[in-house]
Amino acid sequence: MTVSTLAERQPAFLPNHHFGGPGNIGNPAHRTLWLCGIEYGESPDQRGSENEIADYSVAMQWRNWTYNRNAFKLIAAIEGQDVATAQAYAGEKKIFESNTSDYFQTNLFPEECRNLETWSQDAQLRTGFKDKQDYLARIRSTCFRQMHEQVLHHQPRLFIGVGLTHAEDFCQVVLGRDVTLERHAFSVNGHPKTILLHPGPIPFAVVPHLSARSGLNSNEALATAGRLIRDMIQKS
């Protein structure tokens, strides 16, 4: 199979692209908390029983992925819980596990890549784009408006974008335009941390990556970020 160029064909996922992922996308009658990353990544390893893997169980998420463990801690803090009890809280609420829960996990870009710089031959064949920047540009120009309409339709009670370098992308998807977000800086053991906030009908936060060394990588950082987001929600 020959890899197409950007101009030769429109990939099948583009015309009607929708947010996907585990958990409950919600609706205005049952508004859910959305955690939105950039793209699927980290380890593909899913250590667990067939049932755990099929259910995307909290136990499997906690065991396998730093990103999800820290997401549970951040969410626990936002919900007014102690981050030390995050695993128990996630299990009780079935975070991302149940399609009737109060939580939804998704990503901006649909293709799986192990890191942002990766663009494998397999990804080229799946998407029809030789160059990742062309792929990203097409998603932004073709899908972000559709995704913004989905956000308005589903009305999440909180939208958390994960990845400060993609703050403008998250603004386009959540708000439909570029907006200057409130910058909140704090320090943990001498290491500076920043989160971006925007109160409103759909409260919106952008946080550093949840599994990077420079991100929200400690209980104290996650607890502080969670408290700031909680305070913002209460003012919305």
Image (cartoon, helix red, strand yellow):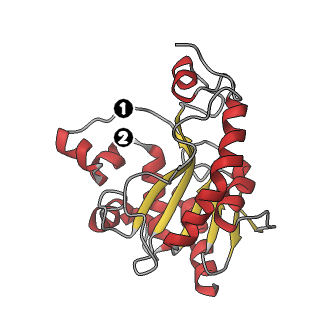
- The numbered mark, 1 or 2, whose residue comes first in the sequence reads 1
Residue type at tag 2: Asn
Q: Give the CA separation, mark 1 to mark 2.
A: 7 Å
- The percent coordinates of residue 104 (x first, y second) are 43, 61
Residue position marked by numbered label 2 in the rendering: 64
- The percent coordinates of residue 64 (x first, y second) are 36, 40
Quarter of the C terminus within the rendering: bottom right
Q: Where residue 45 is drawn, which disc sits there?
A: 1
Residue in the picture at 66% in, 48% down: 142
Q: Is residue 149 left or right of residue 141?
A: left
- The percent coordinates of residue 98 (x first, y second) are 29, 61
Q: Secondary structure at mark 1?
A: loop
Residue type at tag 1: Asp
Other residues around mark 2 within 10 Å, as few (<14) / some (14–19) / many (≥20) = some
Seen in the picture, residue 153 relative to 166 is either above or below; the reply is: below
Q: Quadrant for residue 49, please give it.
A: top left
Q: Is residue 164 left or right of residue 220?
A: right
Q: Nearer the viewer, residue 127 or 183?
A: 127
Other residues around mark 1 within 10 Å, as few (<14) / some (14–19) / many (≥20) = few
Q: Is residue 108 left or right of residue 72?
A: right
Q: Secondary structure at mark 2?
A: helix
Q: Quadrant for residue 118, please give it.
A: top right
Seen in the picture, residue 112 relative to 141 is either above or below; the reply is: above
Badge 1 vs badge 2, beta-carbon distance below 8 Å: yes
